Amino acid sequence: MNNVFCIIPARDEEEGIERALSGIISGSGLSKSNFIIVNNASKDQTANIVKSMGFFCLNCPEIGYGNACLLALDWIKNSNVSPDYILFCDADGSDDPSDIQKLIQVIQESGDDLVIGSRTLGEVEKGALSPIQIFGNALTCFLIRIFFRRKFTDMGPLRIIRYSSILQLQMEDPTWGWNIEMHVKALQFGLAIREISVNYRKRFAGVSKISGTLSMSIRVGIKILYTFFRLILFRVYQK
């Protein structure tokens, strides 16, 4: 599948990334050439492990999920390749690799612009999502329903979007507002969005950068809400 690039930001994931990437390769139907792993200012051996496995690895010195994704997109723009789709996946092993196949199949067959994996519609391993994550997802989906009259169930990170569409969205958030920015802008630009059920499990090792502590979860929640209302109040129009 040379028409798909899968971007995987990774920060300090040395304990579990080898297992996670091995599972993704064996279960997703993709080859290593489809992946861009972005080492996001890791202080451990994450980058070395990724490279030793034969994956292409970019180094992003600035911490932030969005920064890592933007760096990968810039690399694609400056390369001689032009994929049809961009898929985003986590590096901690929480995503079910078989769901990657589902996402690719759905976007190819449906003609949609953005397909989001909903953990709410799928099976979630006990303890994989913290209560504050569940609440935050519900709140964000409620706000989208109020402002856009569209029903969604999750802001999950496992998603696939047409390359032409993500260029159209002019993505810019450097940190935790990446997913909500993509979702809101897609709605504002009238893109076709679909949810499908995906499964979710506990990360293979380490502590989540988002929900690992209460203080961090609160900071992330504030950033997501800030991003949402900024986009509502100061709508970004197509150039």
Image (cartoon, rainbow, N blue to C red):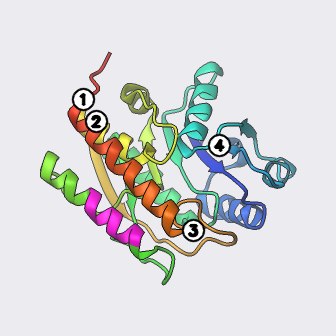
Vertical order, 210 against 70 (above or below): below
Mark 2 and mark 1 in contact? Answer it, CB < 8 Å: yes
Which residue lies under the disc numbered 2? 231
Q: Quadrant of the N terminus?
A: top right
Task: Give the number of the disc on residue 212.
Answer: 3
Q: CB under 8 Å between callouts 1 and 3? A: no
**Who comes first in sequence, dot 2 or dot 3?**
3
Q: What residue would you read off at disc 1?
A: 235
Tell whether 236 sits left or right of 45. left
Q: CA distance from mark 4 to mark 1?
A: 33 Å
Q: Residue at x 63, y 43 (%)?
A: 63
Residues rendered magenta in the picture: 132-140
Judge from the rendering whether residue 80 lies leftward or rightward of residue 109; answer left or right.
Answer: right
Assess whether residue 61 is covered by the magenta stretch: no
Label disc, if present, on residue 34 of the rendered structure: 4
Give the image quarter of residue 234: top left
**Residue 99 drawn at (x, y percent):** 49, 63
